[in-house]
Structures are given as C-alpha cells and as structure tokens.
Image: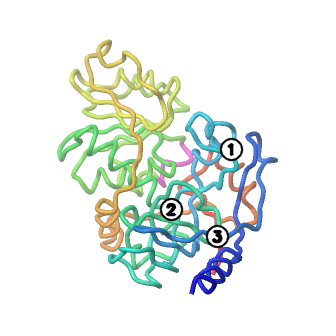
Amino acid sequence: MIENKSKLVRTVMSEKMKAVVIHEYGTNDVLRYEEVGRPQPQAGEVLVKVRAAGINPVDWKIRGGAGQRMGMTLPIHLGGEIAGTVEMLGRDVTDFKQGDAVYGIIKSGGFAEYAIAKAADIALKPANLDFVHAATVPLGALTAWQAMFDLARLASGQRLLVTSSSGGVGSLAVQLAKVAGVHVTAIASGRNEDYVRSLGADEFIDYTKQPFEELVHDMDVVFDTVGGETFERAFATLRKGGFLVTAVAFPKNEASEHGVGVARVQCKPNAAQLTSIRELVEDGRLKAHVTTVVPFEGIRTALELSEAGRTRGKIVLDVGA
C-alpha cells in the first residue's frame, strides 16, 4: 500500500506545465518561460486550468525588485489575476466542482497553464464573458470597490473624482460609482474622452490642457491611481472632511494638513464582492474592456505595454485552451 502511494506521488509530481518565472530581479530580460512541476491543491484550495490572465502594474514592479520589498522569495512565479476552469479540488472544498468556470485573484503563479487558488478567494465567472474578458475584471473591480466603498464610504448622491479614468482600474471605478448613484468627474487625456464618457462619466477633464485642480472643487471623494504630483494636487479638489484614497501613493501627513481623510487601498481577495461584481456584469451594468490580447509566449510584450502606461482598459495574456 505504501509503495502504491509513493508511485502515485511520483506520478503526480512528474506532471509538467509551462509558467513564467523569474530567478532574479531586473528588466524583462529576466523573464523565463519554463517547464515546471504542476502544483497540487491542498485543503481549501483548487487547481485552476488558466485560460487567461490579467496584466497589472504590480507584475512588472515585482519583476523589477518590488518582490523583494514585499517579502517574496526567488524564484517567483508571476501573475495574480486569472480566469479559467477548476481542474482539481483540494480537501474540504464544497463550493466548486470540477469544470466550473471561475475568476479571481491569487497570491502568485497566474502566468501559467495551471495555478493554485484558495477556494475562498475566487468565484464563478460572469456567464456572459469569455475567459479573456473575465480576466480583466477581478483586480481592478475589487481595488475600486474596496477603495471607494470600504475605505472612503462613497455613497449615492456624492461627488467623486477619478484621476485616471481610462485605465484598467479607473474605468471600472467610473462604472461602479455610477451604479451606486454617484456623480463622477473623470480625468484622462483628450483622446480617451469618448471612451470615458461611454462608461458613464458625468464630467470629463483633459489633464493635458489645464491643471485639473483649477477646475475641480468640493469633491466628496477622490480615487487616485496615478500617484506622484497628481496625488499631491488632488487634495485641492476635496471639500473639508472629504476623503482621498489612492492605489499607488504612500500617504504621510496629508490628512491633518488638508483636513480630510486619506488611505491607501491594498486589494484583498473577496469572493462575496466578486460574486456581486459578477451579477453587475451579467446585468450589463459593468463592462469589461480589453485593450490588447497577447499570446502566452508574449509575456515580455505584455509587460512592456503595461509599463508604458498608455493603455486604455486592460491587457490580457491568452494562456489558451
């Protein structure tokens, strides 16, 4: 009996898959497309056959050295936003069955043919989206949801400013805010005006023509995904007692200096919120926007496009069938 179990373990561990791995930090030159052992789900986990993976700034930041600051250990399997099908269930998993189409965010390893996800962190994907479009939603929608509603307590009738409204996170923030009955002022370059207005923005500001803080005042909430000078200047647009939440900057003493609230959102997996987001997508009130689809082997191209910072919507890695 022991011998049979050992043979089983060896068989399982011998199964291989392709994955994007880094063994050192640096530019895109450190990316490796490797054959590695296929992981096995433990208690409370599922093995997902990845069909598509979202590309996010955190991916190239980890590659560039942020992984070390985040406490990650080399080698690192990149990728944290996926859509795919449940291939195998770990012990005690009852919410899913083999073959279920799911989406969500995971700790690492999403740029691979298979990835491990905690069952409590993922949800059934929207039925009206293919895998590529489903992979655009989890991180951006959860980040916007948790920033605006959990931290800033944004509510119907309030006024919101979104500093980068055409990006993967900002475009979803505009839509979620409109669903909640919020008046949205959106900032982007002029070439994105039609796109951003199609998302439901009430007012649009082309940041290339005039400083936005000269035009916007008395906002209840600002959601910033740009950081730097944009983050600093955005405080001038808030009313006293307003709230600025950022996805990129690191607040210091701005709250007391400006008489407002300030926080940095750290996106966390949340299956209940993903389920609510799925319902909005299926009802047609939240739409996924794909800018570019890159084949699995084109990971370097995908990260280059993301790092350039000029994309509209989302870049997606098509891992395949």
Q: How many marks?
A: 3
x 73%, y 40%: residue = 25
Could you give the CA–CA distance between mark 2 and mark 1, rounded to whole angstroms? 20 Å
Q: Which of marks 3 and 1 precedes in the sequence?
A: 1
x 64%, y 48%: residue = 306
Q: Examine the structure image and report whether residue 194 is included in the region drawn in magenta.
A: yes
Kind of residue at disc 2: Thr
> Which type of secondary structure does the marked residue at label 3 adopt?
strand
Q: Nearest to the eye among marks 1 and 3: give it.
A: 1
* Rendered image: mark on residue 63: 1
Kind of residue at disc 3: Asp
The residue identified by callout 2 is 136
Q: Main secondary structure of the magenta part?
A: helix
From the viewer's perspective, tell me whether residue 219 is left or right of residue 191. Answer: left
Is 91 above or below relative to 202? below
* Rendered image: mark on residue 318: 3
> Which type of secondary structure does the marked residue at label 2 adopt?
loop
From the viewer's perspective, tell me whether residue 279 is left or right of residue 207. Answer: left
